[in-house]
Image: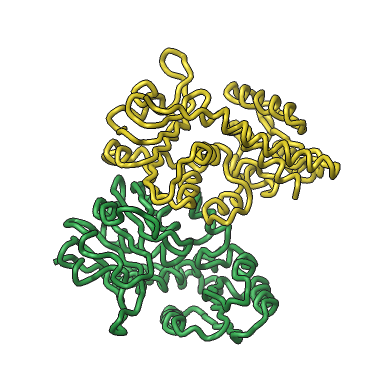
Chain colours: A green, B yellow
């Protein structure tokens, strides 16, 4: 049976370091403050935001939700972003996405000051992930995958990493981060031919497709480590990842669970970014 | 014997389109102007700059070399960059790299206005290549690889593309551009284990290592298309690519020559960027 790479111990280790930094900042009279910008009521965001508020409280940092109604005009969203940019008490901003369709998300995303961009949504931050120059902060979920591999001692150097999915939120950034760890990286996606063969060939599989049970037994082999980024609801209404977990745990050597895997680390990474930003 | 994917016809096709755009701009009284910024006398740059001046003359655009001595202070280089940024008659800037070691190249690179960045050296341009958002211009050499594949009708959709090299000048951007063409992309580098196996598995190989004869017969197979980005001088003092050309042409289905391959397209892509910038 595969080792289950739980997110909680990874998050705990990150939070411990973050706590120490928060204590240092407190001595300088700085209390990190995160603003969560949301437009409308997306149910999927609820639990993530709840988790953030809870973690913020536990760590003793401030987190404020700045909400606008679903029908808010683009200008209102941009004004709020501008306000958060200018507010010296706000060290970091997390914008819940997607924004309602009548709003140009690209425009709003680009309006955020890169130094307050906690989740790698600005061009500057993405350029930093691409170049490996560490300007700005990487998308939290992508970084969480790498944190899990680091925590469980999976050295990527020279290893074949197969990333399934090429989004700017996960697939592309996590590919660049794995490359930065000296992995040989293959990026697969919906147009990939012979997907099973390519995935099977990898030492580490990072699945970020957003489709329940997308990664099936025939794509997996003994000895692989599998990071499942997907958060989906299956036909039975149950939360599940992109990987057929029941099949995977009988084949591969290690796999992250859903829930309790990558998702359990994201908030810790977010707080780590916030505290870093507050210290600058 | 492999088809030889010569750069000249690709460049000619690009130049033809560029000429038409130059004529349109002329009607509006605009004459595109490129500034080539160089510090010191790097011999390798000489022939590239000569090619640019020649091409500029043939197309009827202006190109000026703005040279500083090898021992120029960082401030002088930054001042010149600022001057070029502000000069409304200059539409594009090409900075010859590397700069002398006493100058912080990153600082100078970032000082360039993204809209005048003809060769994808700014963070904004690199972020655009990464995100596929087409903000800014891609590095000319990376784009040249894609132009060659396009010109010779090599459709990358679903195909396995192996990029050897992960530099910001070629490896990473060309990987993202191939991904944008729906290829399944594998990025290899000096730390890759079982390189031969991985390269052999690909349908298209893009070699950007900078080592003469790095890609050998055992890495190649029938049916592959090979793009050789390397420009090296071998032990006999002869110009050659990263690929063992003599071996490759007996194995693969198509290969670019060196010289006369990718390098022959770069200037055409540069002029295409310049004319686009002048029209904005």
The residue closer to the viewer here, A79 or B200, is B200
Using the image, determine if residue B208 lies above or below residue A276.
Answer: above
Q: Residue at x 42, y 30 (%)?
A: B255
User: Where is residue B63, by image quadrant?
Assistant: top right
Q: Residue at x 26, y 52 (%)?
A: A197
For the image, the number of numbered tags is: 0
Q: Quadrant of the C terminus of chain A?
A: bottom right
**Residue A249 drawn at (x, y percent):** 18, 67
**Residue B112 drawn at (x, y percent):** 68, 45
**Residue B246 drawn at (x, y percent):** 37, 21
Using the image, determine if residue B52 lies above or below residue A129.
Answer: above
**Residue A68 drawn at (x, y percent):** 61, 84
User: Where is residue B70, by image quadrant?
Assistant: top right
User: Where is residue B253, by image quadrant?
Assistant: top left
| Residue lying farthest to the top in this orientation | B236
Relative horizontal placement of residue B145, taking residue B67 as reference (left or right)? left
């Amino acid at each position: 049976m595969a080792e289950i790479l739980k997110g909680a111990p990874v998050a705990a280790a990150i939070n411990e370091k973050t706590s120490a930094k928060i204590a240092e900042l407190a001595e300088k009279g700085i209390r990190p403050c995160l603003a969560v910008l949301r437009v409308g009521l997306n149910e999927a965001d609820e639990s993530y935001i709840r988790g953030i508020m809870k973690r913020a409280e536990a760590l003793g940092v401030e987190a404020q939700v700045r909400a606008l109604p679903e029908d808010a005009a683009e200008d209102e969203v941009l004004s709020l972003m501008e306000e958060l940019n200018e507010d010296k008490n706000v060290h970091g901003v997390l914008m819940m996405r997607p924004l309602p369709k009548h709003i140009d998300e690209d425009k709003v995303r680009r309006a955020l000051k890169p130094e307050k961009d906690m989740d790698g949504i600005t061009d500057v931050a993405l350029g930093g992930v691409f170049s490996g120059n560490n300007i700005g902060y990487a998308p939290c979920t992508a970084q969480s995958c790498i944190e899990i591999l680091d925590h469980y001692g999976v050295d990527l150097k020279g290893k074949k990493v197969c990333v399934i999915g090429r989004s700017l939120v996960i697939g592309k950034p996590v590919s660049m981060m794995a490359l930065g760890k000296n992995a040989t990286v293959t990026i697969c996606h919906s147009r990939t031919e012979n997907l099973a063969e390519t995935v099977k060939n990898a030492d580490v599989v990072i699945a970020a497709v957003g489709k329940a049970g997308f990664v099936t037994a025939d794509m997996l082999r003994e000895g692989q480590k599998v990071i499942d980024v997907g958060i989906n609801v299956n036909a039975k209404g149950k939360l599940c990842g992109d990987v057929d977990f029941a099949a995977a745990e009988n084949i591969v050597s290690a796999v992250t669970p859903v829930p309790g895997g990558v998702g359990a680390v994201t908030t810790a990474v977010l707080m780590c970014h916030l505290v870093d930003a507050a210290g600058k």
